[in-house]
Image (cartoon, rainbow, N blue to C red):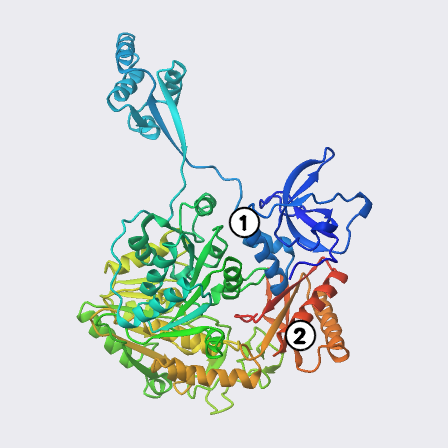
């Protein structure tokens, strides 16, 4: 991949820290090292005017000298035994650069642990430095001279011999100046100890739970493979509440017992106190966590603890993938279908693919788990790339909830114009009477101003891309894939009804309606507005778990990984909102969200109900969600993807062009598209490749930056790789400082 005897020069970084990452130095590769040198190698080099021998890391190998070759110094040697963690992370960064498109420096900043200068946390203790007999004589002197602060401190030291510095300066009311004075006299010493912030806690370990037959079959099979040296990727498809986490922990136990480390990825939104506590109860202080709400100091400490071997298990969102563990044995990605596993920033890496590459570098296994696997992963499992396991039963006595699908078109015909169907109102009243809890889910994910008819459910779609058109301020309906547009109409083109409108709903609207309809119910709302402050997310969930509220209203953040035993009703207000997003993955996201939301009800021994309110009850994604039938959904959706050449059957490269003026963006994106079309028609790419766009992005202007999107489609990933290189070369040769071009392979979100 990165070795070549033709490569004469190496670009080397001498200080891996975020503040200095942009500076590299070029060296000649001596002939005796050309066959063995590779990206990420730790090398010895002469540095500076004095040619002092220092060490650095190889970031790039090239046959192009950036300076006069005669003036370049030569690498001395390769130190293959040093800094194995960095070696692997740099190799991973290079793979990400090649796969997803970015500079090496940008990829390196993504994978290397945070090394910002942060104030180290210390614990200071005050220790008696003289014999007790001598201290008692000194105490008499302090009493005689009325040195009350010194007397108070020395008296406590004689009793305890060692005191916490913080307690002395706060509880004993002794100043730091007094402590320093006694230290100068040699009466005491102040000892400092570096302390790492522990973000997970120190819950005592408890005995593991007993697995049922299904769980044990899966864990035994994967552990048996691991002990035989078999390394592969597994997909565990387990319905909501089937006990996937217990299976993970059983396998983690076996891997950690062999001295290996484990990375557990969980979507940020599902990384709850409940989840972390389950791991702490099993593994105690071997566990650490990392997430977006940690301070820079806390994040730094967690990576340092991992580097030093103080922890064996790191839990967190996709950034936890880059934990500097020396010997990773297992990577687990829970809720692997979540779009948050795809990075929004360059390089736009996907955690699943990147985890598989990292596992290859370490000789580790990968486990993916979900109640609603992504089509990409399930397709690979069907093709034999992954080993598939299924969990079909909930643990204990819990049963899947009864799911009721309500046709909101019929509700409208019956004169019900409220946002609550008669069935949902009836069940809310029933649960309130029984003192049970209710969750109301507003399915806003992927919302982009789609237009649909309330009377017949018809959605206005693009005739070329089969995704819904979005309504813009000028009244036009636009496709954000190919740019097709048409004028909006006041009446439905299918049934002639005047009830054709944009879909709009919000948590606040639902909360207001609940308060009017059920004034005696206590409500909580969880959305972007109510979770802005640190810990607000946890506080809302804790309050609901403590039964301080009857009804929790929220967006997708309330349906991820939570386990509330008294929730027996889940109301899904408008299932169609994500279904009609202008995105080819809209049906997949809708099925996943509805199935996950339905899984929150009836998780204990109390039966649960789910009400799905929709204007399109006949849509296959809705029907499959009502029946909790993943296979039915998969068969329908994969047929649609095959017809349209969408991933995972085909592949796409999204090319986003951004700039300060509409004219500049139109000019640059148009010129790039023309060059690309010419290269495809006259070059090695055709046939089997097509270009869609450029067109306005779904958000065509963001923070005063104009945006155009173009998609390149092909079933051949090698061809798309060559197209990516062509675009990168074009952008390098036509460097316009006012323009930014971002590449995204197989995007999981629309633009």
Quarter location, residue 252: bottom left
Residue of label 1: 84
Tell me the residue at 67%/47% (across/down).
12
Residue of label 2: 719
Foreground pick, 5 / 602: 5
Q: Residue 126 placed where, x, y %?
A: 34, 25
On the picture, is 230 further left or further right than 709?
left
Secondary element under disc 1, as helix, strand or loop, is: helix
On the picture, is 742 further left or further right than 494?
right
Q: Is residue 580 above or below residue 113?
A: below
On the picture, is 677 further left or further right than 551?
right
Foreground pick, 284 / 709: 284
Foreground pick, 248 / 724: 248
Tell me the residue at 41%/77% (across/down).
591
Foreground pick, 266 / 32: 32
Single out the mark in the foreground, 1 or 2: 1
Q: Earlier in the sequence, mark 1 or mark 2?
A: 1
Q: Residue 144 placed where, x, y %?
A: 27, 7
**Residue 358 in sight here:** yes
Tell me the residue at 39%/27% (across/down).
191
**Disc 1 to disc 2, C-alpha distance:** 34 Å
Tell me the residue at 80%/43% (across/down).
71
Residue at the far left in the pictured view:
434
Quarter location, residue 276: bottom left
Q: Quadrant of the C terminus?
A: bottom right
Q: Quadrant of the N terminus?
A: bottom right
């Amino acid at each position: 991949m990165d070795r070549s005897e033709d490569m004469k020069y190496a670009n080397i970084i001498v200080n891996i820290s975020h503040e200095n990452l942009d500076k590299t130095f070029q060296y000649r590769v001596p002939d005796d090292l050309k066959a063995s040198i590779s990206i990420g190698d730790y090398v010895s080099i002469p540095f500076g005017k004095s040619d002092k021998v220092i060490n650095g890391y190889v970031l790039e190998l090239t046959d192009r000298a950036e300076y006069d070759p005669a003036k370049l110094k030569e690498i001395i040697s390769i130190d293959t035994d040093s800094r194995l963690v960095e070696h692997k992370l740099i190799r991973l960064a290079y793979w990400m650069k090649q796969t997803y498109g970015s500079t090496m420096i940008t990829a390196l900043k993504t994978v290397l642990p945070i090394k910002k200068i942060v104030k180290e946390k210390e614990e200071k203790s005050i220790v008696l430095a003289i014999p007790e007999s001598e201290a008692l004589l000194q105490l008499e002197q302090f009493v005689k001279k009325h040195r009350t602060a010194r007397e108070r401190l020395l008296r406590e030291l004689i009793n305890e011999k060692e005191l916490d510095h913080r307690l002395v300066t706060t509880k004993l009311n002794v100043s730091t100046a007094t402590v320093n004075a006694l230290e100068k006299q040699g009466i005491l010493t102040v000892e400092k100890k570096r302390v790492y912030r522990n973000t997970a806690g120190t819950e005592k370990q408890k005995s593991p739970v007993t697995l049922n037959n299904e769980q044990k079959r899966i864990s035994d099979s994967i552990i048996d493979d691991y002990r035989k040296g078999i390394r592969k990727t597994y997909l565990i498809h387990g319905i909501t509440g089937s006990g996937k986490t217990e299976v993970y922990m059983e396998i983690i136990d076996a891997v950690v017992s062999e001295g290996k480390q484990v990375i557990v990825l969980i979507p940020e939104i599902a990384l709850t106190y409940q989840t972390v506590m389950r791991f702490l109860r099993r593994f105690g202080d071997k566990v650490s966590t990392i997430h977006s709400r940690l301070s820079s100091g806390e994040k730094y400490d967690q990576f340092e603890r991992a580097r030093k071997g103080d922890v064996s298990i790191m839990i967190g969102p996709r950034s936890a993938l880059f934990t500097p563990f020396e010997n990773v044995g297992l990577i687990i990605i829970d809720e692997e279908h979540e779009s948050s596993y795809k990075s929004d920033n360059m390089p736009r890496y996907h955690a699943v693919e990147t985890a598989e590459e990292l596992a290859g570098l370490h000789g580790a296994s990968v486990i993916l788990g979900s109640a609603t696997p992504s089509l990409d992963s399930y397709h690979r499992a069907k093709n034999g790339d992954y080993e598939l396991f299924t969990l079909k039963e909930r643990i204990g006595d819990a049963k899947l909830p009864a799911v009721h699908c309500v046709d909101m078109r019929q509700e409208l015909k019956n004169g019900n114009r409220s946002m609550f169907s008669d069935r949902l109102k009836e069940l809310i009243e029933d649960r309130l009477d029984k003192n049970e809890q209710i969750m109301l889910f507003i399915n806003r994910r992927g919302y982009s101003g789609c237009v649909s008819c309330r009377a017949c459910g018809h959605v206005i779609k693009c005739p070329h891309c089969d995704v819904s058109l979005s309504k813009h301020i000028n009244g036009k309906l636009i496709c954000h894939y190919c740019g097709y547009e048409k004028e909006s109409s006041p009446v439905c083109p299918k049934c002639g009804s005047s009830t054709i409108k944009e879909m709009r709903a919000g948590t606040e609207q639902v909360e207001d309606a609940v308060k009017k309809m059920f004034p005696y119910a206590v409500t909580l709302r969880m959305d972007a507005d109510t979770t802005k402050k640190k810990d607000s997310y946890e506080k809302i969930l804790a309050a609901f778990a403590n039964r301080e509220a009857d009804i929790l209203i929220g967006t997708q953040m309330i349906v991820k990984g939570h386990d509330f035993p008294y929730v027996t009703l889940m109301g899904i207000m408008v299932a169609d909102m994500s279904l009609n997003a202008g995105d080819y993955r809209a049906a997949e996201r809708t099925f996943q969200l509805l199935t996950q939301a339905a899984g929150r009800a009836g998780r204990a021994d109390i039966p649960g109900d789910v009400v799905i309110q929709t204007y399109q009850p006949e849509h296959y994604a809705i029907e499959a969600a009502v029946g909790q039938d993943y296979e039915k959904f998969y068969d329908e959706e994969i047929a649609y993807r095959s017809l349209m050449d969408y991933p995972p059957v085909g592949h796409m490269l999204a090319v986003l062009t951004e700039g300060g003026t509409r004219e500049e963006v139109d000019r640059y994106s148009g010129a790039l598209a023309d060059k690309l079309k010419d290269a495809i028609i006259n070059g090695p790419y055709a046939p089997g490749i097509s270009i869609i766009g450029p067109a306005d992005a779904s958000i065509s202007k963001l923070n005063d930056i104009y945006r155009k999107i173009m998609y390149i489609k092909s079933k051949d990933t090698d061809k798309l790789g060559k197209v990516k290189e062509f675009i990168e070369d074009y952008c390098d040769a036509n460097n316009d400082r006012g323009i930014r071009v971002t590449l995204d392979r197989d995007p999981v979100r629309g633009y």
